[in-house]
Amino acid sequence: MLRSTMSRVAGALLRRRAAAAVTARPVAAAPAIAARRSYASGSTAEQSLLTRIEKKRQEALLGGGEKRIAAQHAKGKLTARERLTLLLDEGSFREYDAFVEHTCADFGMEKTKITGDGVVTGHGTINGRQVFVFSQDFTAFGGSLSKTHAAKICKVMDKAMLVGAPVIGLNDSGGARIQEGVESLAGYADIFQRNVLASGVVPQLSLIMGPCAGGAVYSPALTDMTFMVRDTSHLFVTGPEVVKAVTNEEVTFEELGGAKVHTSKSGVAHLAFDNDVEALARLREFVDFLPLSNRHPVPERAAVDPVDRADAALNTLIPTDSTKAYDMKHVVTRVLDDGHFFEVMPDYAKNIIIGFGRMDGRTVAVVANQPMVSSGVLDINSSVKAARWVRFCDAFNIPIVTFVDVPGFLPGTAQEHNGIIRHGAKLLYAYAEATVPKITVITRKAYGGAYDVMASKHLRGDINLAWPTAEIAVMGAKGAVEIIFRGRDADARAKAEAEYIDKFANPLPAAQRGYLDDIVAPADTRRRVIEELALLRDKTLKNPWKKHGNIPL
């Protein structure tokens, strides 16, 4: 079914492309040729040159040829150009370096050249907003990376930084072009260097749509977001054959580096999609939330959802029994515009929720503990997941709204031995370092060090609100009483527990000390958060000058 659907889509795209090739030359080239002909001599030599140029252009459009295109479709995959057709606004793509060919003369490569050299690069728009793109062409040398292939990618990355626009890479490559040896490796390093320089300057997005192995994996790893296509994309440093040779372990491509592994176990990928078409459509949606660069404001659209919309259902959402769970996503969606929440990494570290939404039409980032999973406790994976998200949003000036219901950090030898102290400190560092507007809403528990970490007032939280159900304390009442009244009889401990609950299981002590700006009715949360975001729109805060901080990696 998938391949049939993909074939129909790909077939339609191919027919459209073929018709366009017959009726008109590519838009970017047409004005130059027309201008030339207006004063050209019309000589045979000139006409011959124009014919050669047009022939090369057609060769570039076909990549590795019709047979390899058919093989690509048979795998349920679109070609590099078909993917760009779906990703970008119609007619917006302007291609660079369509005529580039490799320069390798070893192992008979001088006799085997494909125009474009296995990658399509250029710029276009997504919903009218500028982006730079490269799309690796598996039909041409298996999408393998040569020196010229890498140079094409580097050129669009340089231009993206120059003008301030996102870079989107569609990865479908067999890896380094072995025939070129160290030049291919140098090409990867050139890309890595640009990934690092562009980090925090322009958004970098990777969509893995085929194999991506060896050194090639480190470019997506350096970008802000990595998305994958189920069943057809794979990410790994060493393939199954090498794994078997070294460790004698037999593993499939999917088990080693498939989308499910990287979105639920390793955390390398942020989202996975069923096919190329869905992946490209969702990527377009994701880009809509992003500013073009660190110099641009967050995107804004006309808001239909009333700013002052109250939601009485939130008043009864929190269970009266503090040990019972509830779904924090219900809180998030009821507060955001139109209930729309674009969740990121939904299958990894489910005890914390991250993603994008809009409030009064403007993009906001959400971080929220999830009581439905491990009571919302912070552990290694959730700390790393949230820390990277906070730093990404801070880099691009996206306000962060944090919903807190956290009983603390997860205890146990596994967590301690694997570095919960260091990894938990990453989230602390990320929130403390962030200078964007930070608004925190404590819905129920905020215990121990986790209270501090989750965008507390002490970490320069701009507005810290709490619901009447909030409990802010060093720990839960039962655990506190066990320590404070150790050795007392059961009746004394029960009485002490009731006293502790009365004193600390409410937001008043924190509010009386100025650690909370207000205690709000849950129904009014949306209105208050939007009001405070509007107030903070022109917030200016700078950290002390430094070369860079030393986050506990």
Image (tube, rainbow, N blue to C red):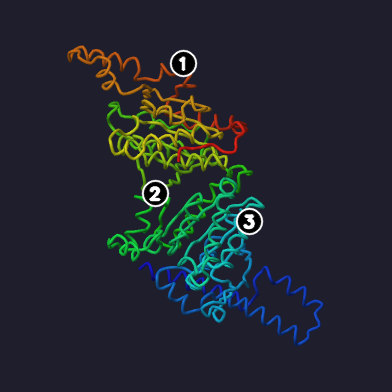
Q: Secondary structure at mark 2?
A: loop
For the residues labelled 3 and 1, the Cα–Cα distance comes to 50 Å
Q: Residue at x 45, y 22 (%)?
A: 519
Quadrant containing the N terminus in the rendered view = bottom left
Quadrant containing the C terminus in the rendered view = top left
The location of residue 496, given as percent across then percent down, is 26, 13
Q: Nearer the viewer, mark 3 or mark 1?
A: 3
What's the residue type where badge 3 is placed?
Asp
Q: Residue at x 61, y 79 (%)?
A: 22
Give the number of the disc on residue 458.
Answer: none
What's the residue type where badge 2 is placed?
Gly
Q: Is residue 257 left or right of residue 288?
A: left
Q: Is residue 499 left or right of residue 174?
A: left
Q: Pick whichever of labels 3 and 1 is earlier in the sequence.
A: 3
Q: Is residue 347 left or right of residue 82?
A: left
Tag 3 and tag 1, C-beta contact below 8 Å:
no
Above or below for 532 versus 78: above
Above or below for 310 versus 201: above
From the image, tell me which residue sits under label 1. Answer: 513
Label 2: how many residues lie within 10 Å, few (<14), some (14-19) or many (20+)? some
Q: Pick whichever of labels 2 and 1 is earlier in the sequence.
A: 2
From the image, tell me which residue sits under label 2. Answer: 267
Give the number of the disc on residue 158.
Answer: 3
Q: Secondary structure at mark 3?
A: helix
Q: Secondary structure at mark 1?
A: loop
The location of residue 138, given as percent across then percent down, is 48, 70
Residue placed most toward the observer, 538 or 305 = 538
Q: Pick whichever of labels 3 and 2 is earlier in the sequence.
A: 3
What's the residue type where badge 1 is placed?
Arg
The location of residue 83, given as percent across then percent down, is 51, 65
